[in-house]
Image (cartoon, rainbow, N blue to C red):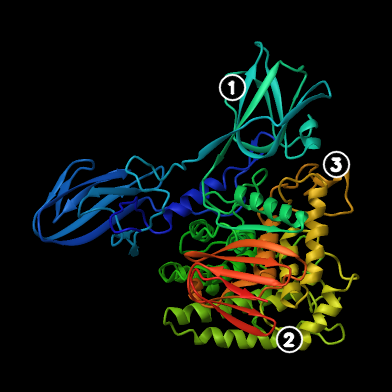
Amino acid sequence: MSESTAVWLWYPGDFEIHQGMLQNFKREERGMGWPAYWYIDDCNRNVKFTRTYQLGQPTQFIVHAIGTGYVAVNEHKYRFDEVINCETGKNDIEIHVGNVSGLPAIYIEGNIVKSDEGWLASNFVTSALSGHDPLYTRPDQDPNVIEYETKTVPVASHKSVDNGILFDFGRAVDGTLIVTLAGPKTITLCYGESETEARDVEYCYYKQENVSANSQIRKRAFRYVFVPNVTDGEVDLTAIHEFVPKLNPSSFKSDNSLINRIWNVSTETLNLCSNVFFIDGIKRDRWIWAGDAYQANFINQYSFFNEDIDKRTLLALRGQYDIKQHMNTIVDYSLLWVIGILNHYQMTGDKSFLKMIFPKMESMVRYFIQQTNDKGFIYGRKNDWIFVDWSEIDKEGTVSAEQILLLEDYKTMLTCGKVLGKDMSEYQEKYNQLYDNLMKYFWDDEKSAFIDSYESGKRHVTRHANIFAILFDIVDADKQKSILKNVLLNDHITQITTPYFKFFEQDALCKLGEQKRVYQVLLNYWGGMLDRGAVTFWEEFDPKQHGKDMYAMYGDPYGKSLCHAWGASPIYLLGRHFIGLRPTQPGYATFKLTPKLDEFKTLHSVLPIKNGTVTIDKDATKLTVTATRDGGSVEFNGKTYSLKANEKTIIR
């Protein structure tokens, strides 16, 4: 925040928690509202803001507030929205604001006394530095209202079919429609992410009947709209797409046009699924899921590099300090949330955010410990969902994938605690016990892999725990090779069909040096969706499915999301494992590139880093790398090259 900038202030985390609650109430299914089915926190309703100024001269200020309350200067009370005079010397300022229907917030206009950094907020139990957000910097705004920008999207094409008109907007739209009718009749709007869905008047996910030119049209996500029982010229539609703008410093262009399309469609997919928060998909859920968000920020790091969306999402998911339930009811999602905070810190170097959120991290991990057994294994309790993935995983008793995530949580606490100067020795003891028992009970020497569950006696092997073991460095090089051979490259082990776990699988394969294989997966799997007409990437893709079956999920003929955040993972895979960019110190104080670009003859890419960018060009056998800030290096063919700010480094 600039020293001269005033912003709206609130109790830290409350804006994110309140808006997160509203986001999780936005789901619609066939005309019915569907609020999220887990416990949802809301913001504090009454907050006290305090600050002491030592003034060398008299000054004036005005307090605007969302809610009811008053201002006290040296115990003398004033109304909101009136000019308040402060005399030279010590001035103790208190601002009390309550709001029974929304987020209590304040904005202070003044030359010296203003709503910038330094204000403490109290909910009358705890106090902390006030929260703020770069979206809210003007006194005429209300932090309870999201200000979307809009873009008019005209119809790309339309055709007469099935005794009606099918409108194709050529892209995924998240917004509303302007309906123009030639006469007084009413119409039905049938929405679809696919043409098949829109034309299915009976079963399409979204439909609005009895629509006139004056009807209020609800915000929805769609590409196609079918209007039955009309002829060409009777109706015209225009879409109004709503979005929160964000910068995109990244680009990717190579000699492979399909890979270029995959990058661009991935960017569009993530862009649509990240406005105020990272949400799973724009059509169906619109909810904030911790597993989706965990992956979205990895992808975000190589595209938009938007720190604020990630912070908002982490705070919204966690809620208030007390924990009543796992995030989204899913044990592994809570576990991933903790790891995601470490990734955010490594990406941004934002120690103040880490310090603010650390108490909620630690209480989350203690919540995990409360549901571990004498072996240190975390288990599912009543109403807990052990998800991992949509796959046939043996979930009888404790599950190996959960234990590996818990190990990484302990490691995360050790790392973050060290940054903040805290004694984390108890987590090292927890880690040691859990690691020993993981290897004793879940590692199967005969199968040379982790089994899902030892309690069932089935010795069933799936990819998931084995992938996590590689990603989080749980096993040594020999066991990694065994997992690669016996699991990841074993066609008898059930294949993964969700982009969610494709992300983890391809990440692990790249870590083991299998970029060539992953390159083919990008072409075949994500390219396969493009072959089916995708303009955004899907929640799930099974190449064996065709026709209407492609869109079915959850027992619903159109239940599958065709614009899902986790589908955008090619951005991360290309940026992290082909271009090879990663921070080696938090906030890219130092960073490294390890390019593996054998699959490309030519390539030009710009990737973001903290407070800068890195540009890499490949032309035949020559690499040229330029960074806009110091601290970088390139490792290539056994040699290390230092990068200096704004100087080209040529590698042959």
Point out residue 76 in the picture as x, y percentages from the top left corner.
13, 51
The C terminus lies in quadrant: bottom right
Structural crowding at the residue carrying mark 2, measured as other residues with C-alpha within 10 Å and reported as few (<14), some (14–19) or many (≥20) = some
The N terminus lies in quadrant: bottom left
Query: Are the residues flagged by discs 3 and 1 in contact, CB closer than 8 Å?
Result: no
Point out residue 319 in the picture as x, y percentages from the top left corner.
49, 59
Secondary structure under badge 1? loop
**Which amino acid type corresponds to the residue marked 1 in the rendered image?**
Ser
Work out whether mark 1 precedes mark 2 in sequence or the reverse, and give the earlier one: 1
**Which amino acid type corresponds to the residue marked 2 in the rendered image?**
Met
Secondary structure under badge 3? helix
Q: Which residue is mark 1?
A: 215
Q: Is residue 7 above or below residue 634?
A: above
Residue 398 showing in the rendered view: no
Q: Is residue 309 above or below residue 645?
A: above
Q: Which residue is mark 3?
A: 548
Point out residue 596 in the picture as x, y percentages from the top left corner.
71, 73
Q: Which of the 4 image quarters holds residue 125?
A: bottom left
For marks 3 and 2, give the CA distance: 44 Å
Q: Which residue is mark 2?
A: 439
Q: Nearer the viewer, mark 3 or mark 2?
A: 3
Point out residue 309 in the picture as x, y percentages from the top left corner.
51, 56
Residue at 62% across, 59% down: 296
